[in-house]
Amino acid sequence: MTGRRLVVTGSLAVLAGCARPELPAPAAVAPVTLQVFAAASLREVVPALSAAYSQAEPGVTLLANYAGSQDLVAQVQAGASADVFLSANRDHPQKLADAGLVAPPVVFALNQVAIAATPRNQRVRSYRDLLQPGTRLVICAEEVPAGKYAGQWLAKLPSAEAATLRERVVSAEASVDGVLHKVRLGEADAGLAYRTDVRRGGLRDVPLPPGTAISASYAASTVTAAPHAAEAAAFLTWLRGPAAGQVLRDAGFELPAP
Amino acid sequence: MSDRLFGCALRLLAGCYAGLVALPLLALLLHATPATLAAALRSPVVWQAVGLSLLTATAATLLVVAGALPLAWLLTRQVTRWRGLLTTLLELPAALPPAVAGLGLLLAFGRYQLLGPWLTRCGLPPVALTPAAVVLAQMLVAGPLFLRAARAALEAVPPRVLQASAVLGAGEATTFRRIVLPLARPGLLGGALVTWARALGELGATLLFAGNLPGWTQTMPSAIFVTWQVDRTAAVSLSVLLLLLSAGALLLARRCAGEVL
Amino acid sequence: MSELRAHLRLRRGAWQLELEFALDGHTALVGPNGSGKTTVLDLLTGLAAPDQGAVWVAGDCVLDTARRLALPPARRRLGYVFQDAALFGHLSVAQNVGYGPAVGHGAAAQVDELLGQFELTELAARRPLELSAGERQRVAVARALAAEPRWLLLDEPFAALDVAARPLLRARLLATLEVRGVPALLVTHDAEEAFGLGGEVLVLEAGRLVEQGPAERLAASPSSAFGAALAQSNHYRGQVVASPAPGQAVVQVASLRWTVPTPAAVGVPLALVVPPAEVLLATAPPATSARNQVVGVVAAVQCTAAGCRVTVQGAVRITALVTPAALQELGLAVGSPAVALFKVSAVKIC
């Protein structure tokens, strides 16, 4: 968000160029805007990362484009101008790396599948409540990474319970945002999302049954045709460093073992 | 000379625009072979989406006709100061982004929103995330098309003809059934077909309000939207199918309108 | 014949309509455009509502604002033929005529008879779009009569027809009305057409009735607006006594016999108009091809920039419009014997 606002302000200044009073001289290095294609579930943390990075590298601004990871893959395939690709899984960037479109992906953060219960009613207090008749559960469609993780989680449950849960599903949303939206409004009693989403507030975290944790990896890669390849590589190095790690942990992510 | 230039410019711009419209349609058709189409039709997910779409779009169109036809008739006959404002309001949903329409539906019919608690008290199941929600979303977005067509068709019936019927001894109901409906029929049918085509293509409001579950609320457009990166063949087949259905409806609508001319 | 009685008041901005009448037979409502003629018909049939007023049809009160009574148009049993016919475009000619019986007014059995009377039998299966203006108007009249109205109101029904076709349709209409005993209220802006209907005349000007009475009496009064309108031309009423050739009839007018261009059969009453410009003058009966003449003496001479109007009084009065030079050559003055002549083709049937 911050990145976008900076760019907008900049272009307004250019538009107003003629009447512009003298501005302080820019830093020695020409300012660079990095195009970051980020998975929708990173929407909350990327602005924080951007703010932290602008302190480390004052000349570089992040401009984020959020979408479902599968959409971002399609955009990169279509030749969209991007520097960095932050995906909600490893498979998607790996597919692009195989095609030579991005550098091999590196996992920079981990997330957990979580059950988010609506604050509108107390119907779902525990995992058991999900199995009750009449419970309305939303998940992501299996085409979406979060939907794949949901499938993996269901596979870890006793098959009878998994079948019951599948019957409780009232919608398979096209993005995690759709799941969260419907749970927040109370149209669904609970939804399967990421731990970071549940932490974001407004939702109740329902513990998963023991032994069914599913970890989701976020992978970063530089785009082969990046307009700012050097800056992109520098950002990725910083992303795996302690400063970025702190920001990610604050947002509820876990860090991969070094 | 300048006329020739004008002619050239006219053809050039017209050609560019027509190409722009035709190219994506052509690309879709080129992408789908009869074999893939047949294969897609055998897939239960596609089949379910087609069935649900046809069912909900038809239901939505019938419900729209049932409500918007009387409304159009009242608007045509009642000359009130509020008619302009009312008409604008009723046609607004067609101009809104469908997502806004979907959000509005959620906030109106949602379990914990305006009408929801009252519906629950009446013992009714929740509306959102059900096939009924699909129909409601389609009605809201496509309904204004019918309302507009119906008003045009009804207003085209000359007042003197209605009066002739009245003087000859027909009451309002009889005049409506024997004179108004037959005279406005081509316009009404055309409007209903256009409405049906729009309902068939509805996506934004449906995703927000009705969600997406194969066999339950997944329409053809939702299925295309969700599957296109993973299973492009299925998505393209569905798209072509949707294209053919809509084209058929629009062609029929044109034929209906042609009857009036 | 049934009576049609009404008093009506209506205000639309600066325009006001206020009138009262009681009719018991064919009546023409004449007046210039904008005088409110059509509005009167709309108020009588209930297609419009007056601010104040009452209407009785054959003794039944169908509207009385004082008693908050207003029967809907469907229950007033008044026939209304609109200026533009207003046929039902999706129905055939037969279905149009049969509409009243189909919705419960009139007997279905008489539809065929009416189709025959208005020469529509062969057009029965056609749609209104396939008809000429005259045919459409015939359908409109037949349709109105099929619903068995107590009165037939007609709004300039012949305006869309060419001049030659009007007398025929009118004769057919009058004959049918006679048989069915239905009186007509005919709205027209044409004084001659009103004269042709032969009954009472109501003259409407700016929403008020300025004159009311039998056509003859009003026509004879030069101070009457209707009389003044008619005075522009010569008007006669007569009856067909012979039909010497197809398209021609001999009409008895007073003691005179004139040949006029009409296919009307023997016995049909006719109203004739002879424009003064078509009338020639002579001092003695000449040898001429003109079939029609009036022998008498000059009763009046009135010269204006447009020419001299010479009125000859014989068995009937007739006015000729001639140039001052012609008048001088003939040496005509008030009191001198004169003959007025006109050709068959000069006579208009109204």
Image: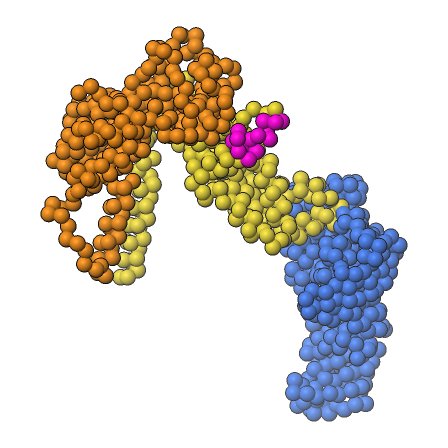
Percent position of residue A34, x then y: 19, 38
The segment highlighted magenta reads: B109-122
Q: What residue is shown at x 47% (from left), y 38% (from top)? A: B101
* Colour in which the image shows chain A: orange
Residue A45 covered by magenta stretch = no
Left or right: residue C125 versus residue A40 is right
* Residue B54 in sight: no
Percent position of residue C232, x then y: 72, 77
In the picture, which chain is yellow? B
User: Compared to C329, does A201 lie above or below?
Assistant: above
* Residue B16 in sight: yes
Q: Please tell me which residue lies in front, C270 or A88.
A: A88
Percent position of residue B29, x then y: 33, 30
User: Compared to B177, does C14 lie above or below?
Assistant: below
Percent position of residue B137, x then y: 49, 33
Q: Quadrant of the N terminus of chain A?
A: top left
Q: Quadrant of the C terminus of chain A?
A: top left
* Colour in which the image shows chain C: blue
Q: What residue is shown at x 71% (from left), y 75% (from top)? A: C275
Residue B113 covered by magenta stretch = yes
